[in-house]
Image (cartoon, grey):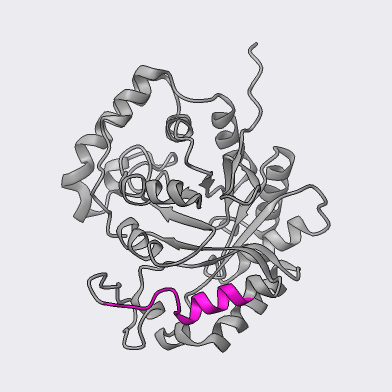
Amino acid sequence: MTAMKALENRPFGHQGERVTVIGLGGAELAKHSLAEGVATVRRALELGVTYFDTAPLYEHSASQVIIGNALEGVSAPYVLATKLGFLGSPELHRSADALLGQLWANLSALRRDQVDVLQVHSVEYACWWTDAASEGELLDIEAAHDYANAPVMDVLRAARERGLCRYIGITSNRADILAHILRSVDVDACLVAYGYNMVFRAGQRMVLSQARERRIAYLTAGIFYPGLEPTQADWRSSLPVDIRPQVEDKLAKIYALQKESGLSLVELGIRFLLADPDVSTILVGAATPTELEASVAAAQQGVLPTDLHAAIEALGLSDFIPAL
């Protein structure tokens, strides 16, 4: 039997930090129970995973509680990231007091005095950047905004100066908006969800080169959505109607490649992304130890065969951004 490769470590930005290429995203940790979530985090530690990402949005902070419980007393090195955002009303996103209050609540849930990475959650929403934003309004990138001196960026910088975090970052489901804001802010990390996987590549095209040039850590998440869920028996029924015409044919070809190769969707998706050395961490939203084990095992196999990688590479949509 061929021995599995060790889980690869990659640079996290430019300050000497390194993290495993597979990270545990916390959005699904409370899906079944708190105990199952804690078991998943502890299994991640056993497997050598060193990056953990959470947010107060995830199950009303239950994800933070789970991670705080599971990591308490752990002496092995790891990097823990959380976020600020989704405070309930647009104006609170422009309030330093509200943002600091959420940060203290995050630290309390996580059972610690500091986190490693503090991020803005979903920078695509206009409420971060203007006082005139309505609920759920997306940012108009044609309008002029002072991104660098927005209240949330002031809070992130102050938190870093006070030792409440070591690194700061921004996140988004919209690669185009994140790329626009990233040009104006000084951060250590950026995270794009649904922007870089076997079909959607806007995060790769719009953000990754900028992150590479500035030596900013690039994290990718949501790599199995939409239409690529490993547990979805009928993938066509899971496709949002508004994106079906653009992606249905490409997804059908992905599933044909899966059948032909004999590999699982998890193996295809993770091993495809492994080939890009500029991706710091692939976040997987595991809800159980078994789901996490599948992702780690896929990463341990290394990159896909050249012909299979090339076939998937040819199916990418570099400009299309799913409306999630």
Above or below 21: residue 96:
below
Looking at the image, residue 265 lies above or below residue 75: above
Residue drawn 48% across the image and 33% down it: 274
The answer to whether any part of residue 35 appears in the image is: yes
Residue 310 rendering spot, x and y as whole percentages: 32, 24
Identify which residue is drawn at 54% across, 86% down: 96
Q: Is residue 58 left or right of residue 36?
A: left
Is-magenta flag for residue 249?
Answer: no
> Residue 112, percent across and down?
76, 68
Q: Quadrant of residue 306?
A: top left
Residue 145, given in percent of the width and then of the height, sits at: 33, 78
For the question of whether residue 221 can be seen, the reply is: no
Question: Left or right: 229 with respect to 255?
Answer: right
Residue under the image location 31 percent in, 88 percent down: 132
> What is the number of callouts on the image?
0
Which quarter of the figure is the C terminus placed in?
bottom left
In this rendered view, identify the residue nearer to me: 297 or 174: 174
**Residue 146 painted magenta:** yes
Assign the N terminus to one quadrant of the image: top right
Horizontal side of residue 255 vs 189, given as left or right: left
Q: Which residues are magenta?
A: 144-158
Q: Is residue 228 above or below residue 322?
A: above
Considering every residue shown, the one lying at the far front of the view is 213
Which is more toward the observer, 130 or 14? 14
Q: Residue furthest left?
A: 245
Is residue 135 toward the left or the right of residue 282 in the image?
left
Residue drawn at the location 59% of the way across and 43% of the way down:
11
**Residue nearest the viewer, comparing 88 with 80:** 80
